[in-house]
Image: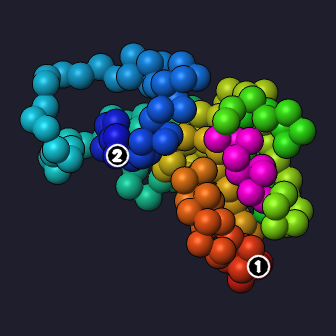
Amino acid sequence: QLYVKGELVGGCDIILEMQKNGELGDLLKSVQPTSTPAPGPPAASSAPAPSQPTPSGNNVAAGSGGEGLEGRLKSIIHQQPVMLFMKGSPSEPRCGFSRKVVDALNSIGVPFGSFDILSDQAVREGMKVYSNWPTFPQLYVKGELMGGCDIVLQMQEAGELKSTITSMM
């Protein structure tokens, strides 16, 4: 698992896909290390910068009109009972992870709405903070974050995806 600034980015599959798409380099370039930390999990004393998400994950766009953006994010999340924040659209995913989640949802016949996070930078960055989940896709059921690609695929493999979504609705 890879952590950046104390936040889980993902496991092997996510990291390899991010590397292939060029996202890993972008993510790592955005990190300004102050020192070379010892191997292992982040130190408990490292506090997030003011513009970073708080442990509750509700610090959307701190100090820059975050209430308006947070309200907009909540509105988009609740557009459909099952909502997928993805790169591209269900008919034209622009990322392998997004395609996998779309395929998983289609395979169980669950109708879902989607939002192309590549079409709106404010929503893309805001969702990372709002959800306290740094990667996409992000799947929401009745306004609750279910998870990303790894979680959806694990549930599908275990035969639990449809029943879990149904029980959340």
Q: Which corner quadrant of the image does residue 144 belong to?
A: bottom right
The location of residue 62, given as percent across then percent down, is 50, 38
Q: Which residue is pictured at 54% across the width and 53% down the height?
A: 150
Q: Which residue is pictured at 79% across the width and 35% down the height?
A: 93
Q: Closest to the observer: 67 or 143?
A: 143
Categorize mark 2 by other alpha carbons within 10 Å: few (<14), some (14-19), many (20+).
few
* Residue 99 falls inside the magenta stretch: yes
Main SS type for the magenta part? helix
Question: Which residue bears the numbered disc 2?
Answer: 1
Labels 1 and 2: the sequence-earlier one: 2
Q: Which residue is pictured at 58% across the width and 23% down the height?
A: 21
Q: Closest to the observer: 124 or 109?
A: 109
Query: From mark 1 to mark 2, how far is it between C-alphas?
Result: 29 Å
- Residue type marked 2: Gln
Question: Which residue bears the numbered disc 1?
Answer: 166
The residues colored magenta run 97-105
Q: Is residue 26 above or below residue 75?
A: above
Question: Looking at this rendering, what residue extends furthest in the bottom direction?
Answer: 167
The location of residue 90, given as percent across then percent down, is 85, 43
Residue 44 appears in the picture as rendered = yes
Q: What is the number of the mark on residue 72?
A: none
Total number of numbered labels? 2
- Residue type marked 1: Thr
Residues under numbered marks 1 and 2 in contact, where contact means CB atoms less than 8 Å apart? no
Mark 1, secondary structure of its residue: helix
Left or right placement of residue 111 versus residue 167 in this view: right
Residue 69 appears in the picture as rendered = no
Left or right placement of residue 156 versus residue 19 in this view: right
Looking at the rendered image, the quarter that the C terminus falls into is bottom right
